[in-house]
């Protein structure tokens, strides 16, 4: 128990509960300050990357590359259209923002990891670099798979069903919204092995349990694909099958992961 001097010259005794509250308040404020700093660094890096990519190669070049799968499936001489007044400017800018996020993704993941790392054990903090690299590569691999495989197949499949009396002219804003939702879906899907490994490492589930629920995961994969992808069988299969395969890959790698011990959970100050 301590004494605190008031403004009127008298003393006031502080209880241990008051000391604990003060410590908790200081810790909470320090975490908020750190979160603010890391968010600020992330925004600054994203802004710098965006400015560089806006100047070179430029929004138009980036959008033309993104639109290539759709343009390849359209009849010869057909182009995409813009129905909004400022759409021809805003859509390429949004595409440049997406490209900037992809380039800065490793830095964004590092800032997220650095924020939570102090609450982890020292041997768990060593996973930072492998997780950041693998997460970035898997997310980009998911987007690349979507761009080079899924889009080429799905757009050609849809174009084959278009009647001869119809001339397709997709709106560029609708196309961008579709592309971004598909990129996010496939990028997150390719993170499944990382999620499986982390679940096993932190003792949330065991490898044996993951094998037992394999059938439910397959069903869930097709349900998720049916919700996210367009209403065609091809795109649904091209999302559900990789999701299931990556789940199996995660189980394969999780076999070599040692779960966190119970005594580690009981002793949070142990940094071995």
Image (spheres, helix red, strand yellow):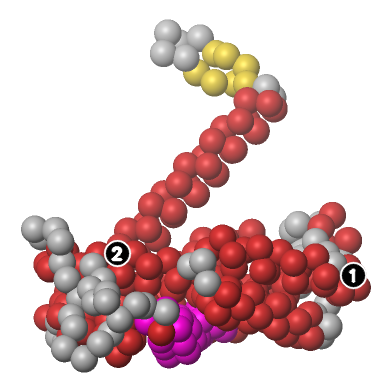
For image coordinates 47% across by 14% down, the residue present is 6
Q: Nearer the viewer, residue 236 or 161?
A: 161
Residue 144 visible in rendering: no
For image coordinates 18% across by 80% down, the residue present is 79
Q: Which mark is residue 212?
A: 1
SS majority, magenta: helix
- Under circle 2, the secondary element is helix
Tell me: 240 left or right of 200.
Answer: left
**Residue with the mark numbered 2:** 174
Give the CA distance from mark 1 to mark 2.
Answer: 41 Å
**Relative image position of residue 189 (x, y in whole percent):** 58, 73
Q: Residues within 10 Å of mark 1 (few under 14, many from 20)?
A: few
Of circles 1 and 2, the one toward us is: 2
Part of the protein shown in magenta: 134-159
Instruction: State which tag comes first along the sequence, 1 or 2.
Output: 2
Tell me: 10 left or right of 123.
Answer: left
For image coordinates 16% across by 88% down, the residue present is 77
Q: Which mark is residue 246?
A: none
**Relative image position of residue 161 (x, y in whole percent):** 42, 79
**Relative image position of residue 235 (x, y in whole percent):** 53, 76
Tell me: 269 left or right of 131.
Answer: right
Q: Quadrant of residue 170?
A: bottom left
- Under circle 1, the secondary element is helix
For image coordinates 34% across by 77% down, the residue present is 163
């Amino acid at each position: 128990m301590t004494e605190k001097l008031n403004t009127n010259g008298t003393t006031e005794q502080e209880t241990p509960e008051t000391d604990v509250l003060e410590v908790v308040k200081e810790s909470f404020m320090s975490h908020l300050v750190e979160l603010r700093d890391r968010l600020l660094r992330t925004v600054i890096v994203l802004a710098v990357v965006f400015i560089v990519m806006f100047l070179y190669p430029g929004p138009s070049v980036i959008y033309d590359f993104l639109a290539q799968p759709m343009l390849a499936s359209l009849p010869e001489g057909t182009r995409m259209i813009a129905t909004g007044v400022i759409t021809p400017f805003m859509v390429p800018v949004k595409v440049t923002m997406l490209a900037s996020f992809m380039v800065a993704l490793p830095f964004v993941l590092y800032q997220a990891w650095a924020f939570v790392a102090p609450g982890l054990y020292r041997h768990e903090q060593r996973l930072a670099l492998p997780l950041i690299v693998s997460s970035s590569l898997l997310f980009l691999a998911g987007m690349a798979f979507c761009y080079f495989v899924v889009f080429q197949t799905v757009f050609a499949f849809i174009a084959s069903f278009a009647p001869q009396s119809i001339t397709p002219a997709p709106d560029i804003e609708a196309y961008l919204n579709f592309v971004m939702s598909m990129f996010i879906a496939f990028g997150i899907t390719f993170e499944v092995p990382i999620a499986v490994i982390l679940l096993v490492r932190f003792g949330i589930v065991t490898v044996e349990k993951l094998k037992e629920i394999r059938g439910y995961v397959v069903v869930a994969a097709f349900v998720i694909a049916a919700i996210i992808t367009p209403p065609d069988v091809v795109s649904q299969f091209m999302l559900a099958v990789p999701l299931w395969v990556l789940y199996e890959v995660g189980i394969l790698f999780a076999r070599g992961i040692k779960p966190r011990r119970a005594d580690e959970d009981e002793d949070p100050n142990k940094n071995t």
